[in-house]
Image (cartoon, grey):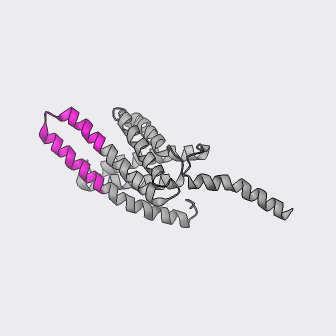
Amino acid sequence: MDAQSTMLTAGAASPASADGKRGGLSRRWRVSELITIGIFAAVIKVSSLAIALAGGGMNPVSLMLKNAVFTALLVVLLHKVRVFGTLTLFTLISAVVSLLLMGAGLALLPAMLLAGLASETLVMALGGYGRTVPLLLGVGCYDLLSKGLSLAFSWLMMREQPALMVTSTVMVTVGYAGSLLGLWFGVAFVKELRHAGIVRE
């Protein structure tokens, strides 16, 4: 009986283990994971607004801090919910939150969704959601693509005003520097959350 129970337990656990190694490609989100994605999207958006307001606008310090917090929390989210499509769903929910809070956020949604899909494809190509390095590269790629696409959109809107375009380029560059810093903070947060048992291996 004991041997049979052990075999049944191992058989039941093996699909989840194999799915974890594939990075969640073959399973759907659980309800708790959908709630987690929604909470993170709201917290990230509200914290970004709070930092911008506390900093008195988009000065370099608040811009770097806002992007660092965004990226760090995104790294934690992808370690918490290791399912393909999480980043894309997060982008969609973030756009809805932006629409509710500020009445804007849908203009860049197609480009942001494209950035999310491309970044998640990169994660899967590099080994899946079960490894930290592909996740970090995917988040870094998402930040780079989303900021690059927003800069391209700004160029379309302000191509007749070169001075504003230069300002936008500087702001995007400073923001991405904060995003790179956020990758390091995200790894540190994940390590602490693993010790606390909140994020599993």
163 magenta-colored = yes
Number of marks drawn? 0
Residue 115: x and y in percent read 38, 42
- Judge from the rendering whether residue 81 lies leftward or rightward of residue 63; answer left or right: right
100 magenta-colored = no
- Judge from the rendering whether residue 158 lies leftward or rightward of residue 105; answer left or right: left
Residue found 56% across the figure and 65% down from its top: 196
Q: Nearer the viewer, residue 33 or 88?
A: 88
Residue 182: x and y in percent read 37, 58
Instruction: Give the main secondary structure of the magenta stretch.
Output: helix
Residue found 48% across the figure and 40% down from its top: 89
Residue found 58% across the figure and 54% down from its top: 20
Residue 165: x and y in percent read 17, 41
Task: Look at the image and tell me in which quarter the C terminus lies.
Answer: bottom right
The answer to whether residue 105 of the structure is visible from this angle is no
Q: Nearer the viewer, residue 80 or 40?
A: 80
Give the extent of the magenta segment: 148-177
Residue 14 in the image: above or below residue 94 = below
Location of residue 185 by image quarter: bottom left
Location of residue 99 by image quarter: top left
Residue 46: x and y in percent read 40, 46
- Judge from the rendering whether residue 158 lies leftward or rightward of residue 29; answer left or right: left
